[in-house]
Image (cartoon, rainbow, N blue to C red):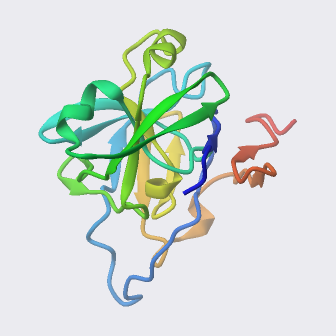
């Protein structure tokens, strides 16, 4: 495991993350959360938030395709079990020590989310909460988001989990390609008005 994990806390506007896994092409995926509400100020100066359920608790996480791993506030450490190790981490906002734990089951509604990693980081989110002007319990990173094809509907304030095997791409709207920084994080070069 590298000594430092670089990840960006970016307010990204993305339409579709790369979907992983190969469900049978003959049947729709039944493991998708399908549709959920997002905060009304998402993409309008604020990060995109979703309520993630951990151990029966619904907590506000923001979605960040630039974060390679899911992170949780250090206040959740008592629920995470035995700590594997501590390590320094750096974000675009702060540098601090983080603890590494086995990844707990994460849910959106009643649906269990797939996680490509077997661990999560626990770190302080007080600075993120100040910047967001609301409590932030964690980041849902690309280790989870990369397993799904997402559509963000900013008019209806909905996040849709799409079945990439049975998808009518003509109904998706405008796509914004993701570009990649040298450190592996993704960003959108164009804005919503195409400049």
Instruction: Between residue 142 and residue 102, name the one nearer to us.
Output: 102
Residue 129's spot in the image, x, y percent?
45, 15
- 145 vs 105, nearest the viewer: 105
- Can residue 133 be seen here? The reply is yes
Relative to 120, is 167 above or below? below
* Residue 188 drawn above or below residue 170: above
Q: At x 27% / y 67%, what residue is drawn? A: 31
Quadrant placement of the N terminus: bottom right
Report the quarter where the C terminus lies. Answer: top right
Direction from residue 173 to residue 48 in the image, left or right: left
Q: Nearer the viewer, residue 69 or 65?
A: 69
> In the image, residue 137 lies at what x, y percent?
35, 27
Q: Is residue 132 above or below residue 191?
A: above
- Whether residue 157 is visible here, answered yes or no, is no
- Tell me residue 120's x, y (percent): 39, 47
Asked whether 102 or 136 is in front, the reply is: 102
Residue sitting at 64 percent across and 33 percent down?
10
* Residue under the image location 58 percent in, 47 percent down: 65
State the image quarter where residue 23 is shown. Answer: bottom left
Reply above or below: 106 against 162.
Answer: above
Q: Residue at the far left: name it.
A: 56
């Amino acid at each position: 495991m590298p000594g430092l994990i670089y990840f960006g806390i970016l307010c990204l506007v993305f339409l579709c993350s790369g979907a992983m896994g190969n469900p049978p092409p003959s049947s729709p995926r039944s493991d998708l959360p399908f549709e959920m509400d997002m905060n009304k100020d998402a993409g309008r100066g604020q990060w995109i938030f979703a309520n993630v359920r951990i151990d029966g608790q619904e907590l506000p996480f923001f979605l960040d395709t630039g974060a390679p791993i899911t992170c949780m506030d250090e206040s959740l450490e008592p629920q995470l079990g035995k700590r594997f190790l501590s390590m320094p981490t750096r974000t675009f906002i702060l540098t601090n020590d983080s603890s590494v734990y086995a990844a707990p089951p994460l849910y959106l509604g009643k649906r269990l989310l797939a996680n490509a990693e077997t661990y999560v980081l626990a770190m302080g989110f007080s600075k993120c909460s100040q910047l967001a002007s609301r409590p932030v319990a964690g980041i849902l990173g690309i280790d989870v988001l990369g397993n799904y094809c997402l559509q963000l509907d900013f008019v209806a304030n909905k996040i849709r989990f799409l079945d990439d095997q049975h998808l009518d791409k003509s109904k998706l709207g405008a796509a914004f390609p993701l570009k990649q920084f040298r450190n592996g994080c993704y960003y959108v070069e164009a804005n919503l008005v195409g400049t």
